[in-house]
């Protein structure tokens, strides 16, 4: 026997399944759209937070650069003051240096040697004088060489010159003078 189904059950099922698929597809699309919109908001929030952090860091960098500039000014001022202190120290040494040099010269002169002139120019002194014997002049040169205030002591000349009935030895020497000691 042939059966004929006159009820539209298959078509209704197909429609119902198609409708379910459309609804499921729509819900899937809506869910995907919701997830994308949520992710977009999250990324936008992250971007905003990072931009705020960048602005804070740039402000901190600007503040630190200002501090570094001040520190550099203080360092330059410190160097300037140190240079001024060095000049003051050199002036102090220069003030007491000649006294020490002349004291060393006075203590190094033997009893039978006399100095007629002492000229200093640019740290080099020229000393002229006379002694009763050549040994006295030699002793004077050795005393100058031992002194830390005189370096590179060189005898330029000696000559035998009679003076007031005595035989004397006139000399001239050059030496470097160190006032800083």
Image (tube, rainbow, N blue to C red):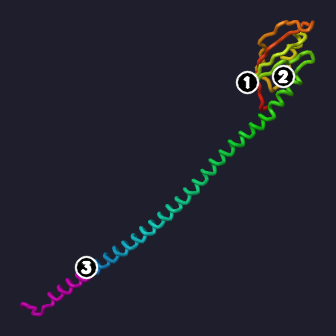
In the picture, residue 104 is in which quadrant?
top right
Q: Which residue is mark 1?
A: 121
Element on which disc 3 rests: helix
Q: Is residue 118 left or right of residue 82?
A: right
Q: Name the spot of residue 180 as percent of width and height, x first.
A: 77, 32
Relative vertical location of residue 133 with respect to residue 64 in this rendering, above or below? above
Badge 2 crowding class, 10 Å Cα cut-off, few under 14, some 14 to 19, many 20 or more, is few
Per the image, is 128 magenta?
no
- The overriding secondary structure of the stretch rendered in magenta is helix
Q: Name the spot of residue 58 as percent of width and height, x first.
A: 49, 61
Q: What is the distance, in whole Å, between disc 3 and disc 2 at their CAs?
A: 110 Å
Number of the front mark, 1 or 3:
1
Quadrant housing the C terminus: top right
Q: Nearer the viewer, residue 149 or 45?
A: 149
Q: Nearer the viewer, residue 7 or 170?
A: 170
In the picture, residue 99 is in which quadrant?
top right
Determine the residue positioned at 41% across, 67% down: 47
Q: Is residue 111 left or right of residue 83?
A: right
Decide which of tag 2 and tag 1 comes sooner along the chain.
1
Q: Which residue is mark 3?
A: 25
Which contiguous range is marked in magenta? 1-23
Per the image, is 6 magenta?
yes
Q: Which residue is mark 2?
A: 146
Element on which disc 2 rests: helix
Q: Name the spot of residue 98 as percent of width and height, x first.
A: 80, 30
Q: Nearer the viewer, residue 150 or 10?
A: 150
Relative vertical location of residue 99 with respect to residue 143 in this rendering, above or below? below
Q: What is the distance, in whole Å, between disc 2 and disc 1 at their CAs?
A: 22 Å
């Amino acid at each position: 026997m042939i059966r004929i189904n006159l009820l539209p059950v298959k078509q209704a099922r197909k429609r119902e399944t198609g409708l379910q698929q459309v609804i499921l597809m729509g819900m899937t699309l809506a869910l995907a759209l919701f997830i994308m919109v949520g992710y977009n908001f999250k990324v936008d929030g992250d971007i905003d937070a990072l931009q705020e952090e960048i602005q804070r860091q740039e402000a901190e960098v600007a503040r630190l650069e200002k501090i570094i500039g001040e520190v550099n000014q203080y360092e330059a001022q410190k160097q300037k003051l140190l240079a001024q202190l060095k000049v003051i120290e050199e002036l102090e040494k220069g003030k007491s240096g000649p006294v020490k040099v002349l004291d060393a010269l006075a203590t190094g002169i033997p009893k039978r040697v006399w100095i007629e002139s002492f000229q200093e120019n640019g740290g080099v002194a020229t000393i002229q004088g006379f002694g009763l014997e050549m040994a006295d002049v030699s002793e004077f040169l050795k005393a100058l060489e031992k002194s830390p205030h005189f370096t590179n002591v060189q005898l330029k000349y000696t000559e035998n010159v009679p003076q007031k009935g005595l035989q004397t030895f006139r000399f001239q020497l050059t030496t470097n003078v160190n006032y800083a000691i």
